[in-house]
Amino acid sequence: MLIVEPKPFEEVLGFLNGDGRIFIAACGGCPVGAEVGGEAKVLETKERLEGERKVVTGYAVIEFLCNKALVGLNLARHIDELDSSDCILVMSCGVGVQAVANTVDKVAYPAFNTLSLRGTPGLWQSTERCNQCGDCLLYITGGLCPITLCAKSLLNGPCGGTNNGKCEVDPELDCGWYLIYQRLKRINRLDLLRRYIPPKDFQKYMPSKELRNSRLWALERKAI
Amino acid sequence: MSRISEKFERGEFVITSEVGPPKGTNIEPVLEEAEKLKERVDAFNVTDQQSSVMRLSSFVTCYLLKQRGLEPILQVTCRDRNRIALQSDLLSAAVLGIENVLCLTGDHVTLGDHPQAKPVFDLDSVQLLKAAKGLMEGHDMMGNELDGKPTFFLGAVVSPGYEPIELQLIKMEKKIEAGAQFFQTQAVYDVRLFERFMEKVQRFGVPIMLGMVLLKSPAMARYMNENVAGVFVPDELIAELASVSREDRPKKSVEIAGRLIRQMKHMCQGVHIMSLGWDRYIPAVLDEAEL
């Protein structure tokens, strides 16, 4: 699940600016989980916009805005409303805004900010994060990721700023390397801590051509 | 050749102090302050955007010190530059005759005055040491051959008061394997703690410089205890500092620092004094330390 929070209403009004007729597309997935989405929140937004003398031409709550097939199917039912709108206000994460923009030739505005989770969480909500670095090091670090757990993504142990097992950036955050040390000590593998880990290859953050052209990259792509 | 490396080699005690480049272009007072210590201090360790506060560069300040006949130690952190810029700056330093390089991770940007900046940390301190050593061997990080290779005397930092010390020692060993030739410690105020630390690191065979931050006031000592990683000022020292009037504090501070250095100097190979604006008291500290 991604976590979103509403942008300040003033900011939204700022970019809606001259656009008087607005269609609202809302995601029924993650934003509902984050308690900022769903029909009730859409109606609330509609009311606030109308209070600012905007016309809300219509709205659609679509189960998952990241699913472009669902977006296309659902928005097709609102063609007239969309045609008569200046823009679409999208109540979703950044993926949903882009999916709507790629489906309808109207300006799509984000109603939310998508918050950083410092890496991708699993589809089941939990604390583990993956930064998709393309060169997994978890076999050296006791199954704890220094890229996502350390504020500096250090690879060869803690920095000098760590204090009582906490991070210099925020004393409420655990020092990732302290956690790694504790884990390796517990499983009797402190020898792994002595291993030199070379700098990351940042080319691996750029998806390869093969991956970009694969079925896995975009299931909806027909070519493969 | 680096004067401090020669001194270490001869088994002589090395004394360094810290130079903080100004926030702005007013460099002259900083250089003058350093020049006054010329007879007492072997080298000047120039901070690199200390505490992530944007200032004049360590690099240029080192060069200006060098021009005045002073021996600089260039601090290089991984916070602001990627591996291309770091290697390039190291080569540039070498061309300007700067040999002593202290390699650090660097504070996180959020601690400084531009907290919105992008934190780089492309390399960590161990990798930076390895890259610098590679340059000395005549190749860059990718193994490409250099046309002319630099000479460096590479330093690193270690925190004797860090808990668990085992984790600190493992990283220290990694730094040595990567290329560290000398170490500067975090400030230590506990003689016994330093003794225990030195017993553990003696076998590494690298020169260790005791770190000493002048305690300016009881409040500062308490602040360091609460907020500075690995620093522990014993209560007796805080009480001793609090026992004198505000006017007598510099004198007391000098006495405490001098005494601590005197008690610990035989255990290590040098001392690095961080005066935090109290450079004028450094000669008195050294007198008190019998150095």
Image (cartoon, helix red, strand yellow):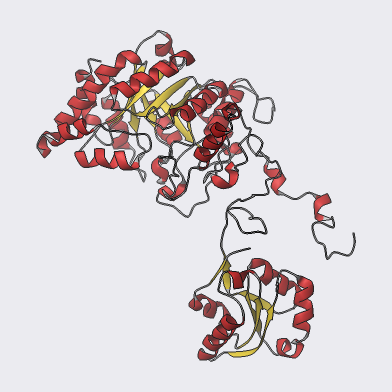
Q: Nearer the viewer, residue B194 or A34?
A: A34
Percent x, y for residue B243?
11, 34
Who's the residue at 71% across and 69% down the image? A66
Q: Nearer the viewer, residue A95 or A126?
A: A126
Percent x, y for residue B28?
31, 36
Does B105 sit left or right of B256 as displayed? right
Percent x, y for residue A218?
80, 61
Q: Is residue B184 visible?
A: yes
Location of residue A64 with respect to B102 vertically, above or below: below
Count up the numbered dots: 0
Q: Quadrant of residue A2?
A: bottom right
Q: Is residue B98 visible?
A: no
Does A127 sit left or right of B22 as displayed? right
Does B131 sit left or right of B43 as displayed? right
Q: Nearer the viewer, residue B162 or B287?
A: B162
Who's the residue at 52% across and 40% down the image? A179
Quadrant of the rendering where the C terminus of chain B is positioned: top left
Q: In the orientation shown, which residue stands out farthest toward the top?
A: B10
Q: Nearer the viewer, residue A30 or A221?
A: A30
Q: In the orientation shown, which residue stands out farthest toward the right?
A: A223
Q: Quadrant of residue B107?
A: top left
Location of residue B31 with respect to A93 vertically, above or below: above
Percent x, y for residue A107?
67, 77
